[in-house]
Amino acid sequence: MEFAELIKTPRVDNVVLHRPFYPAVEGTLCLTGHHLILSSRQDNTEELWLLHSNIDAIDKRFVGPLGTIIIKCKDFRIIQLDIPGMEECLNIASSIEALSTLDSITLMYPFFYRPMFEVIEDGWHSFLPEQEFELYSSATSDWRLSYVNKEFAVCPSYPPIVIVPKSIDDEALRKVATFRHGGRFPVLSYYHKKNEMVIMRSGQPLTGTNGRRCKEDEKLINATLRAGKRGYIIDTRSLNVAQQARAKGGGFEQEAHYPQWRRIHKSIERYHILQESLVKLVEACNDQTHNMDRWLSKLESSNWLTHIKEILTTACLVAQCIDREGASILIHGTEGTDSTLQVTSLAQIILDPRSRTIRGFEALIEREWLQAGHPFQQRCAQSAYCNSKQKWESPVFLLFLDCVWQILRQFPCSFEFNENFLIMLFEHAYASQFGTFLGNNESERCKLKLQQKTMSLWSWVNQPSELSKFTNPLFEANNLVIWPSVAPQSLQLWEGIFLRWNRSSKYLDEAYEEMVNIIEYNKELQAKVNLLRRQLAELETKDGMQENP
């Protein structure tokens, strides 16, 4: 298919663009295969380059011969285009609709994008499982790399290489895979070097109504326990939902078959409930007519902060079991690709100082989201504005980033990255020139040959010139476990995401720049103090030598 077939009118003059925080500008609107571009001949006017894949929905209005297109973006921005001529307006609208809903992944921009920067690091090879395993292998010999899923035959949503207990062979893993939803047998998610406790994750056990069991599964899970130790199974479904799953062939671990493990149910919502919550929240944030009571009422009824609290509470529970009780953890919900990954990731941010660095957080995203099989292509297909909702769309990753921001706000000196880093990840998960978030799992990415045909997001992010934008000037390495508050009073609306197109951040940006300048000046003064101290010490040494020749 040629893009030209979808573009009915490639160019229109005298189009007026209205967008947040910029004056209206008149210019020429151009449609390409992947971008909507508006350029003006006015001096010092910033051009608009908008990826079609960032468009969530469009509305059309007509007043006489003038047509108006309102473009609602996946990053929650709303843009208005005033187009002279009804026919041109209809053509542009239908072209945008066609180009923003392409069925084939291989027609998306990452397959056509060519970087304008020098590629110093190949991001596709920055965080391989073998490299991550080396970090653990120096501390323990109880785990091994398994290549049982090399051809994605055992589990289509797992990577080819996983970390499993050394005492469990590949044949046993194959049997366990048939007992777990989607073949997602328990694998290592995190090893706590301080006390050798671990976090594992998996899909639900397929016990069904007959109480089916799997000896190999029981052996695998028990292989992670130290002598005399107990473990906790955190099920991210309510007990009622877990029991209902048995009727469909799913279920949960029976205490009789897992006597050393205690099961805890921590209900975390998924799918359409989260999507509806996001829609309500964005709707409330965009309505400028609210009085205080109505605004607070709408914020509450969206339940967004309630979901944040549920996820953070469960992550804190996991971290507490690991660090304070010295107990290992197995986490799963139904598939193990959504709420499970939110909890395992956040628990590591609480427990592991490395996950709070830029590269450590990138490794976490790779390991616990991309390689772990979170279906980004499905979950991020639409955002808050699209009317044609599918059952698999859900802001799972955005909720995770929001939870990270809540912790970052409470511990502003413990993270090497800043809020802009999290916002950037949100934007690229929904629309990007890079191939990192394409596909639903490693198997799909392998078939699409993303490593050969697209550029990795990390190749761009990890350039020194870009890293400086995402580095937190307040960062001081903190090797301790951090314990965020999950009290309702401690959780706030993430303005940097939900209100950034509704009110100007000019004064906040100026204050941030001033803070950076003060920190830099403080470093210069500290360097001068250290130099003067050295010089003073040298002079005192010389005086001492002269007095005692």
Image (cartoon, grey):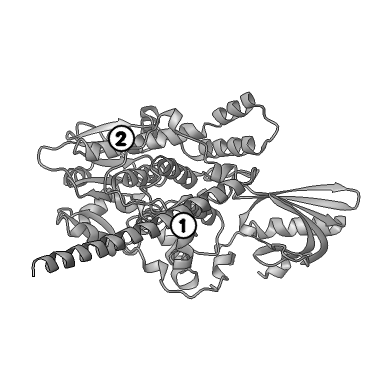
Q: State left or right for residue 481 relative to residue 375.
A: left
Residue carrying label 2: 317
Residue under the image location 8 percent in, 66 percent down: 548
Q: Nearer the viewer, residue 344 or 263?
A: 344
Give amino acid for label 1: Phe
Q: State left or right for residue 476 relative to residue 291.
A: left
| Residue density around tag 2, few if under 14, some if 14–19, many if 20 or more, within 10 Å | some
Quarter location, residue 297: top right
Q: Nearer the viewer, residue 548 or 106?
A: 548
Considering every residue shown, the one lying at the far bottom of the view is 118
Mark 2 lies on a secondary structure that is helix
Residue under the image location 61 percent in, 58 percent down: 53
Residue carrying label 1: 470
Residue under the image location 20 percent in, 50 percent down: 193
Res 110 label: none
Q: Are marks 1 and 2 in contact (CB under 8 Å)?
A: no
Q: Position of residue 383 (x, y in %)?
A: 58, 47
